[in-house]
Image: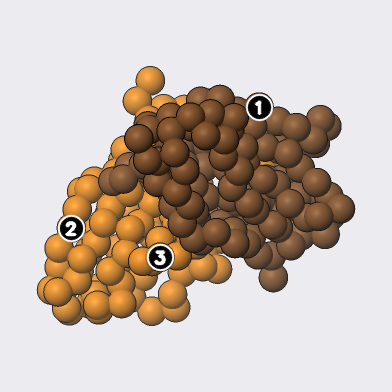
Chain colours: A brown, B orange
Amino acid sequence: AQSVTQPDIHITVSEGASLELRCNYSYGATPYLFWYVQSPGQGLQLLLKYFSGDTLVQGIKGFEAEFKRSQSSFNLRKPSVHWSDAAEYFCAENSGGSNYKLTFGKGTLLTVNP
Amino acid sequence: NAGVMQNPRHLVRRRGQEARLRCSPMKGHSHVYWYRQLPEEGLKFMVYLQKENIIDESGMPKERFSAEFPKEGPSILRIQQVVRGDSAAYFCASSPTSGGRSPPDTQYFGPGTRLTVL
């Protein structure tokens, strides 16, 4: 079965510092990969997605992610974090025969210190 | 353009009661997906529906849970005889075209319904 692993349950960074959230996927063929953000009490907002092509994808709010097939990773990055980025971040994949089933990681909670 | 709407946002039920969760997809979207988020877990797929059709309910518990997406009106996720273990956030997502496309359509999520069973 497909699985998505987010090794870090909780990360704390200072405002202005750089950020990298890790994500590893299990599907062997070409995966479709997503990062979503969930603010407290809110639904999920799509930050970016990777289907094919350039392995570095740009998203909204200054986020980017890099697909590395050799490492089965799709890590999310931001060069300078803002206090408003505090939220929970979910990596997801959508692959195999059922392209509509998103498989989510357990999420990484980001705290931003002033 | 209104996004995916879900109501109620919060629902409290006592054990044994029924819970009805509603989802109105984005305008122009005819494909709806339901996911459940248990505490400290990621979202897990429950069911995929098109208008008047259940396409895939492989993630639905075998008993007490049902879903529909009628020709008119919102999609409904119904939980009968709720138990404490049903307490979770239930999210609905929608997409404009067939969920089986490759690459897949982006799924747009609603704010969720947080169900608490006392």
Q: Earlier in the sequence, mark 3 or mark 2?
A: 2
The residue positioned 80% from the left and 46% from the top of the image is A68
Question: Mark 1 = which residue?
Answer: A58
Mark 3 and mark 1: span between their CA atoms? 28 Å
Mark 2 and mark 1: span between their CA atoms? 37 Å
The residue positioned 28% from the left and 46% from the top of the image is A41
Q: Residues within 10 Å of mark 1 (few under 14, many from 20)?
A: some
What secondary structure is found at the residue carrying circle 1?
strand
A79 left or right of A69 in image: left
Residue B60 lies, in percent from the top left, at: 46, 69
Q: Chain of mark 2?
A: B
- In the displayed structure, would residue B94 be above or below residue B56? above
- In the displayed structure, would residue A49 be above or below residue A103? above
Give the farthest residue toward the right. Answer: A70
Residue B69 can be seen, yes or no: no
- In the displayed structure, would residue A28 be above or below residue B98? below
* Label 3–label 1 contact, CB within 8 A: no
Work out which quarter of the rendered image holds the N terminus of chain B and state it. top left
B92 left or right of A30 in image: left
Question: Mark 3 = which residue?
Answer: B40
What secondary structure is found at the residue carrying circle 2?
strand
- Point out the frontmost of discs 2 and 1: 1
At label 1, which amino acid type do we have?
A: Gln
Q: Does mark 2 fall on the same chain as mark 3?
A: yes
The residue positioned 40% from the left and 61% from the top of the image is B37
At label 2, which amino acid type do we have?
A: Leu
Question: Mark 2 = which residue?
Answer: B11
